């Protein structure tokens, strides 16, 4: 069985409106805050008790396709990491500004 492949836009293809949309949801903002604090995490460990798996999969897809996160398969798991350098290269200070205004308090519904 071949490894799963995930779409990740190139850094130059990141757009402000997609990144802002991805970060506009409290659940996705909480995921980004967790990744910023803890580094790479298994997808199943992100907000595991508070968000159904299918909903989390949807949120992770939006973050990935906006270029905010990177997903890499490892065996049966998917590891999620923040593309901090890429987002900062396109939109310097954006993640810090958004997280300073709600990332620490962001909690999943």
Image: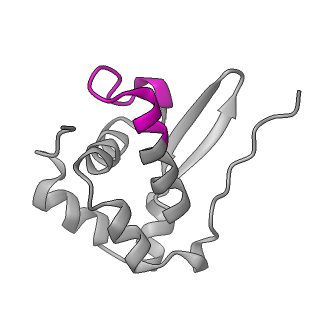
Q: Residue at x 31, y 39 (%)?
A: 34
Residue 49 percent coordinates (x, y): 29, 20
Give the residue drawn at x 45%, y 55%.
63
- Any magenta on residue 52? yes
In what quadrant of the picture does the N terminus appear?
top right
Horizontal placement of 49 versus 4: left or right?
A: left
Residue closer to the observer: 48 or 89 = 48
Vertical placement of residue 62 versus 81, above or below: below
14 in relation to 4, above or below: below
Q: How many marks?
A: 0
Range of the magenta residues? 43-57
Please state if 41 lies on the left or on the right of 30 as rendered.
right
Q: Is 93 in front, or is 46?
A: 46
Above or below, comparing residue 61 to residue 24 in the picture: above
Q: Is residue 96 left or right of residue 15?
A: left
Q: Is residue 40 magenta?
A: no
Residue 53 in the image: x percent, y percent? 44, 28
Q: Quarter of the image containing the C terminus?
A: top left
What is the image's colouring? Answer: one colour
Q: Residue furthest right?
A: 1
- The image quarter in which residue 35 lies: top left
Looking at the picture, tell me which residue is in the foreground, 99 or 7. Answer: 7
Place of residue 76 in the rendered image (x, y in percent of width and height, measured from the top left) = 68, 21
**Residue at x-position 52% and y-position 75%:** 14
Which residue is at 55% across, 60% downward? 65
Give coordinates of residue 8: x percent, y percent.
Answer: 63, 59
């Amino acid at each position: 069985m071949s490894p799963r492949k995930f779409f990740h836009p190139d850094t130059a293809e990141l757009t402000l409106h997609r990144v802002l949309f991805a970060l506009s949801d409290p659940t996705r903002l909480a995921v980004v805050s967790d990744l910023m604090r803890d580094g790479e995490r298994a997808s199943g460990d992100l907000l595991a008790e508070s968000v159904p798996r299918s909903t989390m999969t949807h949120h992770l897809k939006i973050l990935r396709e906006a270029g905010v996160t990177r997903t890499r398969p490892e065996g049966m798991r998917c590891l999620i990491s923040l593309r901090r350098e890429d987002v900062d290269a396109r939109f310097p200070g954006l993640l810090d500004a958004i997280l300073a205004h709600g990332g620490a308090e962001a909690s999943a519904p």
